[in-house]
């Protein structure tokens, strides 16, 4: 459960956050609705915290079982239940299930998906879920870093389909790391509804 604080890490995280803000403000593929782009000055985050960054072991399921995650648009998302991580915050050990998407024929996806809710969800953070993506490693040693937890695109626009975390990934502790609520939430609520757009998680 080693925790890894370092100044370089903080700097890297801040650069990544600034780059994401620039992408969200300028890029045609940004999920921020056009009507809000001008007002958008950046996403909101908890300060970087080594307390929520862990070295963990992936406890792999010998036979990854198919599961169906509910989504914001009622379109089920099929995934494989790949295994779980355990970590401790303030002496309380918790477990998160880890999923892998089922690649379509000809597609290659080497990432793991960790959707979760915690005791800040619906208060300081987006109510439906926050996500972490991890590249599949050659060994079962992983870095689980809640500082990079991000909001699904549905936090910014109703045009997206976002998987919800199953109940077993609802944490009863506060994860004060990663992305907070969308700063333009109230303005977003006032926008007229549009037709559904493409899929993204």
Image (cartoon, rainbow, N blue to C red):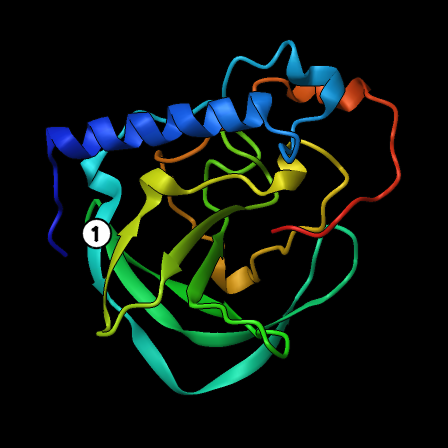
Residue 187 makes an appearance in the image: no
Describe residue 120's horizontal placement relative to residue 92 as left or right: right
- Image position, residue 60 (x, y; %): 34, 79
Residue found at the very far bottom of the displayed protein: 63
For the point 69% across and 61% down, the residue is 70
Q: Which residue is mark 1?
A: 54
Q: Furthest residue to the top?
A: 39
Q: Residue 73 in the image: x percent, y percent?
A: 78, 52
Seen in the picture, residue 160 relative to 65 is either above or below; the reply is above
Does 162 appear above or below 63? above
The quarter in which the N terminus is drawn is bottom left
Where residue 135 sits: x, y (%)? 36, 61
Between 66 and 110, the one lying in front of the other is 110
Q: Is residue 183 above or below residue 89?
A: above
Depth order, front residue of 122/65: 65
At 52% from the left edge and 28% from the top edge, which residue is drawn? 23
User: In the rendered image of this protein, does residue 154 appear above or below residue 82?
Assistant: above
- Asked which secondary structure carries label 1, the reply is strand
Instruction: Tell me if mark 1 has few (under 14), some (14-19) or many (20+) residues whose alpha carbon lies within 10 angstroms of its own.
Output: many
């Amino acid at each position: 459960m080693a925790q890894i604080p370092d100044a370089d890490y903080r700097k890297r995280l801040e650069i990544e956050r600034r780059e994401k803000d620039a992408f969200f403000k300028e890029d045609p593929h940004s999920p921020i609705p056009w009507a809000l782009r001008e007002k958008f000055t950046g996403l909101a985050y908890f300060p970087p915290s080594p307390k929520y960054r862990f070295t963990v072991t992936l406890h792999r399921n010998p036979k990854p079982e198919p599961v169906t995650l509910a989504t914001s648009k009622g379109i089920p998302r099929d995934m494989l239940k790949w295994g779980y991580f355990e970590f401790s915050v303030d002496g309380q050990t918790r477990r998160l299930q880890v999923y892998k998407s089922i690649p379509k024929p000809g597609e290659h996806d080497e990432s793991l998906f960790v959707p979760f809710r915690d005791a800040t969800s619906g208060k300081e953070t987006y109510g439906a879920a926050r996500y972490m993506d991890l590249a599949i490693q050659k060994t079962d040693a992983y870095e689980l870093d809640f500082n990079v937890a991000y909001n699904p695109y549905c936090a910014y626009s109703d045009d997206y389909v976002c998987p919800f975390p199953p109940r077993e990934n609802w944490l009863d502790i506060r994860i004060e790391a990663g992305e907070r609520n969308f700063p333009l939430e109230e303005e977003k609520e006032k926008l007229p509804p549009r037709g559904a757009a493409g899929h993204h998680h």
